[in-house]
Image: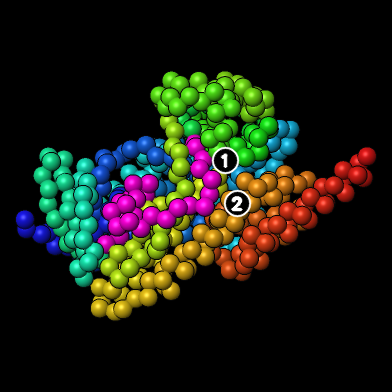
């Protein structure tokens, strides 16, 4: 079997793969993307973070998205709202500590990802849809992939460097035995798109994602991500025992999942009121055990981008931002490899990328243990603390100037304790 040759092979045409390809093509490098699916295709992770706008612009992709905002009903987004029983809170991302954009969009990923991939093609990337990676040989200096096309024919392709942007497909982690257990509990997400029926409700802001904490079990939470055409992405995340409590039987058919979803929603009066006119008109899906990690993110001739390397949790919408950041970090290093330089991938890629991921991890863990919820719903917060938190929620997890960045887990605990004390003092005064 003859082996095709190229400079860079990328597995996956999602945001990480498309942005990496766009960056490389604008530098004149030859790029082939092997993508198992056909676009547009359904994906969750629809609420972007403002930090991602920086990376989209860097990759030459931001104007493409802007040009199609109205066509695809991308919803302008300026923050996040939170609901827990009768408690309400919100953060405006324009009021943040970090420099950079404070607004972005909520997008249907099918359209958003397709736009990015099409622009990467416009820059000259060769995207091969419907092609599946069967095997990878990285023991040679230049990796060789065995690929099967839609006709069932197999071929091999060799690149000077390999980038895995396969997302939840996690091609290299599976083929190269790189997977490492996540220390997060196994959680399940149940989700769909709905006609939300939210018409001029004074307490609802379409320009913000709504995160609702389940009133009886604070480990469980809902996302509601409005689009600009009266529809929303809607999902619930919890550990398995939560769903078992509501009668989950292991039936993952769309009908059974919809019935389960509606049963859980009935136990949430405030959110049920928001969605009193909603229509479930799209099959309900589920994803379980999605948190993932790997032994390492890169070697001399390959690197893992975005979710292919590590995925934390959907609670603060970090997935696309991490994907785009990983491409931004990796591409200059790939160029150095192509020029014959030796790259320290641990020092120059993995450590910088994980610094931000660890910040995201800190407040994901803090959310589930209840500390960050105490911060979010505290009725009394200093302006400076709000701005620091707003920066984290807006995706600026690599801003080393933010006081929360260093020792984020410990500092979030200190802030939570301060907020709890302030709330208790306020309650005592009211009594």
Q: Which residues are magenta?
A: 162-189
Q: Is residue 197 left or right of residue 386?
A: left
Query: Rounded to the nearest whole Å, what is the CA distance between mark 2 and mark 1?
Result: 20 Å
Count of residue discs: 2
Residue 119 in the image: state x and y as whole percent: 30, 51
Image color mode = rainbow
Residue 101 can be seen in this image: no
Split into 4 quadrants, where in the image is the C terminus? top right
Q: Residues within 10 Å of mark 1 (few under 14, many from 20)?
A: many
Residue 413 can be seen in this image: yes
> Which label's residue is closer to the chain start, 2 or 1?
1
Viewer-proximal residue, 232 or 318?
318
Q: Which residue in the protein does label 1 denote?
A: 209
Q: Residue at x 67, y 25 (%)?
A: 269
Q: Secondary structure at mark 1?
A: strand
Q: Which residue in the protein does label 2 denote?
A: 365
Tell me if residue 38 comes above or below residue 20 in the rendering: above
Q: Residue at x 6, y 58 (%)?
A: 2
Viewer-proximal residue, 397 or 424?
424
Residue 57 in the image: state x and y as whole percent: 42, 58
* Residue 149, quarter of the rendered image: top left
Residue 328 in the image: state x and y as whole percent: 40, 63
């Amino acid at each position: 079997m003859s082996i095709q040759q190229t400079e860079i092979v990328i597995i996956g045409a999602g945001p990480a793969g498309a942005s990496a390809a766009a960056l490389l093509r604008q530098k004149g490098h030859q790029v082939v993307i092997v993508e198992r699916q056909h676009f547009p295709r359904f994906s969750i992770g629809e609420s972007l973070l403002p930090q991602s706008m920086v990376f989209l612009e860097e990759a030459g992709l931001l104007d493409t998205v802007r040009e199609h905002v109205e066509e695809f009903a991308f919803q302008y987004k300026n923050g996040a709202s939170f609901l827990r029983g009768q408690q309400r809170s919100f953060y405006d991302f324009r009021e943040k500590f970090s420099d950079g954009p404070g607004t972005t969009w909520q997008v249907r990923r099918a359209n958003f990802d397709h736009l990015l991939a099409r622009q990467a093609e416009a820059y000259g990337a060769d995207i091969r849809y419907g092609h599946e990676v069967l095997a990878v040989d990285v023991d040679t200096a230049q990796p060789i992939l065995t690929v099967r096309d839609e006709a069932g024919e197999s071929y091999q392709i060799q690149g000077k460097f390999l980038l895995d942007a396969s997302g939840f497909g996690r091609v290299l982690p599976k083929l190269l035995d790189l997977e490492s257990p996540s220390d997060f509990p196994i959680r399940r997400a149940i989700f769909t798109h709905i006609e939300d029926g939210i018409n001029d409700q004074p307490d609802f802001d379409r320009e913000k994602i709504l995160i609702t904490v389940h009133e009886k079990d604070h480990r469980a939470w809902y996302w509601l991500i409005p689009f600009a055409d009266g529809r929303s992405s809607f999902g619930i995340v919890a550990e398995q025992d939560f769903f078992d409590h509501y009668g989950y039987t292991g039936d993952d058919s769309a009908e059974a999942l919809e019935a389960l979803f509606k049963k859980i929603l009935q136990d949430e009066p405030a959110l049920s009121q928001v969605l009193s006119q909603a229509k479930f008109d799209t099959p309900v899906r589920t994803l379980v055990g999605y948190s993932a990690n790997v032994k390492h993110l890169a070697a001399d001739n390959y690197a893992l981008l975005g979710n292919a390397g590590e995925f934390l949790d959907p609670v603060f919408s970090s997935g696309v931002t991490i994907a785009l950041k990983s491409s931004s970090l990796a591409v200059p290093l790939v160029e150095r490899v192509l020029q014959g330089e030796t790259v320290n991938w641990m020092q120059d890629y993995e450590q910088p990328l994980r610094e931000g991921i660890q910040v995201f991890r800190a407040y994901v863990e803090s959310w589930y243990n209840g500390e960050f919820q105490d911060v979010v719903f505290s009725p009394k917060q200093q302006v400076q603390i709000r701005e620091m938190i707003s920066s984290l929620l807006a995706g600026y997890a690599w801003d080393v100037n933010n006081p929360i960045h260093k020792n984020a887990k410990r500092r979030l605990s200190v802030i939570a304790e301060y907020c709890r004390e302030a709330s208790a003092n306020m309650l005592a005064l009211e009594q």
